[in-house]
Amino acid sequence: MKSESLVTRGKLSMVATPIGNLEDITLRALRTLKEADVIACEDTRVTKKLLAHYDIHTPTTSYQTGAKARPNDRSPSVGRGFEKIISLLEEGKNVALVSDAGTPGVSDPGLELVSIVRERLPDIKIEAIPGASALAAAISIAGLRAPSFIFYGFLPQKKGRETMFKEIVASERASIFYESPHRIMKALEVLAAHLPASRRVGVFRELTKMFEESVVGSAEQVLAYFVANEGKQRGEFVVIVEGE
């Protein structure tokens, strides 16, 4: 049996990747991806485009098959994807975890995986390799009153969605959420129906990409803009609502 001092412990690196423009990656992130034993991806096909751009040949694996766990669940269920990452860390491997875009752990399964690693392997080092985040990028260019805010991630598609909009409308803090092109118009319609003109809304579309766009004004003004520009209802959206 190996003594404790001779046991090699793995490391989990949470690596932020670009949210659109491939130049938005840090030197430290590139080094970490090159030096890792394995890169754990949401979707290996997406990540391999980034790796090919920077001539990185580290093996990849998917963690997307893992079952979701609640952060406070003391015995979460674990799917095959998560189990593979756990096994690699137990073998002493250095695993670099990435999401499809941005900082892992923010509105993606990385959150659940880290929770499980902390539960199952409390001695494993987990390090942050910071970088691009749609949340931070939107705040930086918004010019909206958001000294404190509530981040909702992606709003529920059905159950709980109406409740969250009620919270957003009544909140004294700014509210920030991600929205898909399939639901952005419905979200703006709800905000326009319930927010006074004095509370501004910002919609930030395709951040860092070729067609990046910011639309800021009252909820009615923002809704009217996207109604008049139907072609701009596509893409990835960050929405910021000023507080009450």
Image: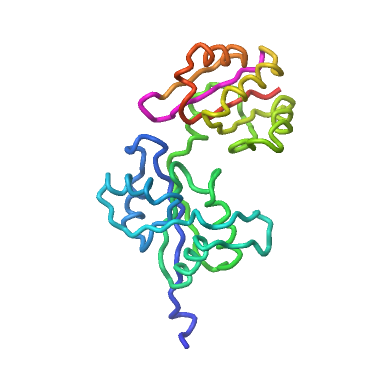
Above/below status of 192 relative to 124: above
Can residue 26 be seen here? The reply is yes
Q: Position of residue 119 (x, y in %)?
A: 61, 64
Is the image coloured rainbow, by chain, by secondary structure, or in one colour?
Answer: rainbow
Residue 161 position by quadrant: top right
Q: Nearer the viewer, residue 124 or 217?
A: 217
Number of numbered tags placed on the structure image: 0
Residue 22 position by quadrant: top left
| Image quadrant occupied by the C terminus | top right
Q: Nearer the viewer, residue 196 or 174?
A: 196
User: Can you name the residue that lies furthest to the left here?
Assistant: 55
Q: Nearer the viewer, residue 122 or 155?
A: 155
Q: Position of residue 39 (x, y in %)?
A: 39, 57
Query: Is 203 a magenta residue?
Result: yes
> Is 243 positioned to the left or the right of 183 in the image?
right
Q: Position of residue 27 (x, y in %)?
A: 33, 47
Task: Identify the magenta region.
Answer: 198-211
- Name the residue: 36% across, 60% down: 36
- Name the residue: 58% across, 67% down: 120
Query: Is 209 a magenta residue?
Result: yes
Above/below status of 94 relative to 49: below
- Name the residue: 68% across, 63% down: 74
Above/below status of 48 relative to 137: below
Can residue 139 be seen here? The reply is no
